[in-house]
Amino acid sequence: MNSAATMHLGSRVVLNPSRKTLRLHRHNPLFSLSKAKRLGVSSISAVRMSKEEVEDEDNSIKERTAPFNFKTYMHQKVSSVNEALEKSITVKEPVKIHEAMRYSLLAGGKRVRPVLCIAACELVGGDELTAMPSACAVEMIHTMSLIHDDLPCIDNDDFRRGKPANHKVFGEGVAVIAGDSLLVQSFEHIVKETRGVSPTRIVRVVGELAKRTGGLFAGQAADLESSGLSEVGLDKLEFIHIHKTAALLEGSLVTGAILGGASEEEIEKLRKFARCIGLLYQVVDDILDVTKSSEELGKTAGKDLMYDKATYPKLMGIEKSREFAEKLNKDARDQLSDFDSEKVAPLICLADYIANR
């Protein structure tokens, strides 16, 4: 048999580095002797794997090839986020303010924004521990916006996440202060709790999140101005929701990417992805407002129609709104095409989750 010959042994060849021999295992039946010479192997020993070795290897292969389980992923991440949020704000003086902060922050919710922050960090090489303070911060900011949205002077809603709104429990004055306190606490939490990240990156994260929070306020103001106006068009509606809804999703993803050490090109792709899913989130929200019950939503259904607010179904109709949502989901996915297919799976699934709530 010459060096170019191939051995058909019904086994897989594994190099034993300590003896420069090859063990021929029961997988992958082809092995070239020329390859063995290139590896500097002096001898080949055909040995059978034990039952335990076969099972261990088969399990390892299954782990590497198993499809991504989004439900398990979300359960694990949301549990981690909830645990971190529980520790982030303790009850202290003044007690009522801190109780009000915890009431809304720990009231449940899908935790989409903090999970996006963590997923973006992990996508570019970071880890959950690094991203968690910022993940908690974006949830604090989001909760602040919900407390304020529900106030009588803004959206005037009595329920949030299936529970009485903050101002219905603690009063309007405390609700305003609780929201403001969560906003301030969010930035303090990033600065105090982030570990293993350079001060330059932390400053950039704070600046990014502050800018997106300002965008959130701009969107809310534009939304208030347009309420009841008949001439509100799609361009104005897009401005509102790029700022009011997409801004904080953008902040979540971009801060996670910065913390994970992403390149500028990766950051911009994730920024565009965030804007797509931000609009997607709002289009779906508008559709649900007119197609689901209050019990299903965990908040008052039909309020957009009640207050004659500009929405996508109002301007485009239900079917066109659904088509627009499908396009936004596709556009979002396109921004992720250059990332590692396994690492990007959580973000793709999160986009689908937003689309199919």
Image (cartoon, rainbow, N blue to C red):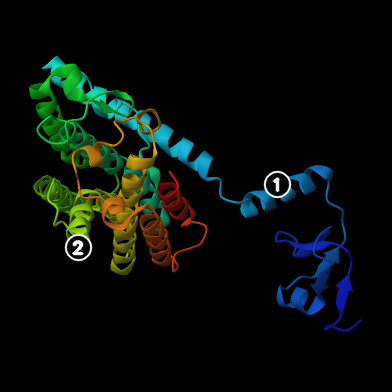
Q: Is residue 224 left or right of residue 25?
A: left
Is residue 200 or residue 233 the one in the foreground? 233
Of badges 1 and 2, nearer the viewer stands: 2
The mark found on residue 235 in the picture is: 2
Quote the CA–CA distance across marks 1 and 2. Answer: 53 Å
**Vertical order, 272 against 202 (above or below):** below
Disc 1 or 2, which lies upstream in sequence? 1
Is residue 53 or residue 249 the one in the foreground? 249
CA neighbours of label 1 inside 10 A, class few (<14), some (14 to 19), many (20+):
few
Q: Is residue 12 left or right of residue 352?
A: right
The mark found on residue 91 in the picture is: none
Does any portion of residue 117 appear in the rendered image? no
Residues marked 1 and 2 touching at CB (< 8 Å): no
Identity, as a three-letter code, of the amino acid under mark 1: Asn
Image spot of residue 148 (x, y percent): 15, 34
Is residue 2 or residue 103 the one in the foreground? 103
Q: Give the residue drawn at x 78%, y 79%.
A: 34
**Vertical order, 1 against 247 (above or below):** below
Q: Is residue 264 left or right of residue 30?
A: left
Does any portion of residue 68 appear in the rendered image? yes
Q: Determine the secondary structure under disc 1.
A: helix
CA neighbours of label 2 inside 10 A, class few (<14), some (14 to 19), many (20+):
few
Identity, as a three-letter code, of the amino acid under mark 2: Asp
Task: Locate the C terminus by quadrant.
Answer: top left
Q: Which residue is mark 1?
A: 59
Image spot of residue 177 (x, y percent): 9, 27
